[in-house]
């Protein structure tokens, strides 16, 4: 595992100040697997953070959230991983049980792939912009949840954190969020505008009150609607 930061890593990481790595359950098998794979978590996390920021923004000089401290916590708990906190102080939890599950067939490469993929998603939550003017995440307007979780998986797809076509969910709706939007965003990025994810992220600052159609108009120009573009995507990838 590479433990040296590149100059590009350092440029982007001016937005990530302190990383506090905490292993709450070092005796678990999952913890031991994690440390064998990633003996020096700080540069590993910073390298993945650079990938995330570079996918969400045009340059390190763009206006984006600054993390004064990231608490990265490895512990024995249910689930996989989640992000908490805010206002410059963020925590990400990654469970030892999921690490152990990923290592079920003694496959170190699988643990490496999954750990990076999960971190891509959670770090996106730390650096992404969120829709404004339509209520909070978890509120009655589901578009906030759709955009936030969809963008996190879009970054994971764009950075190679899923297994390509085999991980793409079939059918469904953009209302289903996560990988449904993640793969949709990347299809638009590949077929219409390579900066699409960056522009959709920026729409959260510019389009107020935020809406899917308003954001698409900002990112791609007038004439695009979410329903028509989603149907075009499904027709293209499933036929």
Image (tube, rainbow, N blue to C red):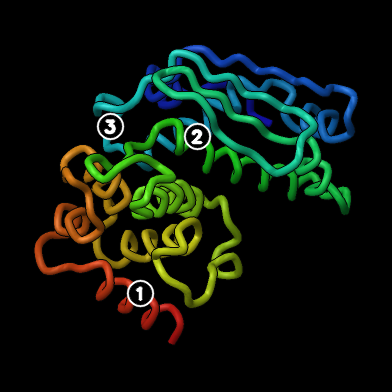
In this rendering, the label closer to the viewer, 2 or 3: 2
Q: Secondary structure at mark 1?
A: helix
Q: How many marks?
A: 3
Query: Residue 129, image x and y in percent?
Result: 32, 37
Please tell me whether residue 146 is drawn above or below residue 148 in the rendered image.
Answer: below
Query: Residue 216, image x and y in percent?
Result: 21, 58
Q: Residue at x 39, y 65 (%)?
A: 174
Mark drawn on residue 123? 2
Please tell me whether residue 201 is drawn above or below residue 3 in the rendered image.
Answer: below
Please tell me whether residue 184 is drawn above or below residue 155 in the rendered image.
Answer: below
Q: Secondary structure at mark 3?
A: loop
Which of 141/180 is in front?
141
Q: Would you name the residue on which mark 1 appears? A: 233
Could you give the CA–CA distance between mark 1 and mark 2, rounded to whole angstroms?
A: 27 Å
Which of 138/47 is in front?
138
Q: Residue at x 21, y 53 (%)?
A: 215
The answer to whether 150 appears left or right of 96 in the picture is left
Could you give the CA–CA distance between mark 1 and mark 3, rounded to whole angstroms?
A: 29 Å
Indicate the quadrant where residue 66 lies. top left
Indicate the quadrant where residue 131 lies. top left
Q: Residue at x 49, y 56 (%)?
A: 178
The answer to whether 4 appears left or right of 214 in the picture is right
Q: Residue at x 86, y 51 (%)?
A: 104
Q: Would you name the residue on which mark 3 appears? A: 59
Is residue 7 among the parts visible in the rendering?
no
């Amino acid at each position: 595992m590479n433990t040296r930061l590149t100059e590009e890593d350092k440029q982007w990481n001016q937005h990530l100040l302190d990383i506090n790595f905490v292993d709450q359950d070092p005796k678990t098998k999952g913890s031991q697997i994690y440390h064998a794979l990633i003996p020096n978590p700080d540069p590993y996390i910073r390298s993945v953070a650079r990938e995330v920021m570079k996918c969400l923004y045009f340059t390190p000089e763009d206006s984006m959230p600054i993390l004064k401290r990231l608490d990265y916590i490895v512990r024995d708990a249910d689930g996989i991983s989640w992000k908490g906190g805010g206002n410059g102080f963020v925590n990400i939890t990654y469970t030892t049980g999921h690490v152990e599950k990923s290592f079920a067939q003694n496959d170190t490469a699988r643990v490496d792939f999954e750990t990076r993929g999960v971190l891509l998603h959670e770090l996106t939550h730390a650096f992404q912009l969120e829709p404004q003017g339509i209520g909070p995440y978890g509120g009655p307007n589901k578009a906030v949840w759709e955009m936030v979780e969809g963008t996190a998986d879009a970054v994971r797809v764009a950075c190679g954190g899923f297994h390509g076509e085999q991980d793409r969910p079939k059918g469904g709706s953009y209302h289903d969020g996560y990988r449904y939007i993640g793969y949709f965003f990347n299809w638009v990025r590949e077929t219409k505008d390579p900066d699409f994810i960056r522009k959709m992220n920026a729409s959260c600052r510019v389009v107020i009150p935020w809406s899917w159609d308003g954001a698409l108009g900002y990112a791609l120009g007038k004439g695009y609607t979410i329903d028509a573009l989603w149907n075009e995507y499904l027709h293209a990838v499933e036929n």
